Amino acid sequence: MNPLLRAKRWLADHLILGLGLLVLAYTFVPIAIVVLMSFNDSSKSRNVYKFQKFTWDNWVDPGSWAPGMADSVWLSIKIALLATLVATILGTLAAFALVRHRFRGRSAANLIIFLPMASPEIVMGSSLLALFVSAGFGGQLGFWTILIAHIMFCLSFVIVTVKARLAGLDDNLEQAAMDLYATEAQTFWRVTFPLVLPGIVGAALLSFSLSFDDFIITNLNSGQEVTFPMFVWGANQRGVPMEVNVIGTAMFVIAISIVLAGGLPVAASRRPSPPDRPVSFQQDSESHRFILVLPGGSGGFLG
């Protein structure tokens, strides 16, 4: 075969694999740097891009963190948890209403849901700020205004995620349960809810990530409160402490653990079971009677 033709064929066979590896490298190299820098000893230099010395102190001694960092992390976690809880409950109820019911203005509601997702964060943040100021909360910006803002932009993501899960459900499953004399409540909790639960959990995880990570909307409506992204932005002017990478690594490990914990049962359920041995008949040489041989190897005479 012509070497040039062979090279072209090899390139065509491995092009997709090579592009995939490049995309993975582009995605995970920054994460690997964050993980590496979480073990960096920066006591002599605060240059976040240069590895000085390996140390466990950033992990085992939270008391050595930069002043205000622990408070900002705890504030972000509280806001993210509350925003996730409220947005998941309201968004799930709204998704069921939009998918399972027909009402006037349903198409307009579906369109409005996408507006917070399509709007730039600076537009949504300034709009919420104008809303709070016009409502008389201009001097009271803080924890509650951040929480309200986060619930509002997380709500759209929850509705869209749960709607996609509901749209893919087979209505025949619920109808079969009703045909077997299950009540509406039993059908919901034993059939519908378990099928929708993966979508709800995914929406909750997405909401938590978006809330914990948000900076622009939070910065416009935070008042004197400082969340973790705002702390990182402020610390960047003086030198980002290595402990910031600890929080990033911990969030990444927790996210991967949750994904693996949710995927392992699914993978186990899809594992192929060993094939059953077919039922066979054998004839006894002495009595000339037929023996039924079961899959487990046991058997007995017929007749």
Image (tube, rainbow, N blue to C red):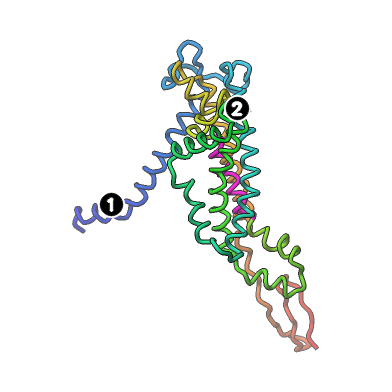
Q: What stretch is highlighted in magenta?
A: 197-212
Q: Which of 126 and 189 is in front in this view?
A: 126
Give me the disc on residue 188: none
State which mark lies toward you, 1 or 2.
2
The picture places residue 176, in percent across and down from the top left corner, at 69, 73
Most foreground residue, 264 or 66:
66
Q: Mark 2 points at which residue?
A: 140
Main SS, magenta region, reads helix
User: Do residues under tags 1 and 2 come within 8 Å of each other at their CB atoms?
Assistant: no
Mark 1 or mark 2: whose residue is earlier in sequence? 1
Establish if 164 lies above or below 139: below
Measured along the vertical axis of the image, is residue 288 above or below residue 58? below
Amino acid under disc 1: Leu
Quadrant of residue 236 within the rendered picture? top left
Residue 106 in view: yes
| Residue 226 image point, x, y percent | 56, 24
**Residue 50: x percent and y percent?**
42, 20
Identify which residue is drawn at 64% across, 38% down: 81
Residue linked to disc 1: 11
Residue 101 against residue 218 in the figure, above or below: below
Is residue 57 something one can see in this rendering?
A: no
Q: Residues within 10 Å of mark 1 (few under 14, many from 20)?
A: few
Mark 2 is on which residue type?
Gln
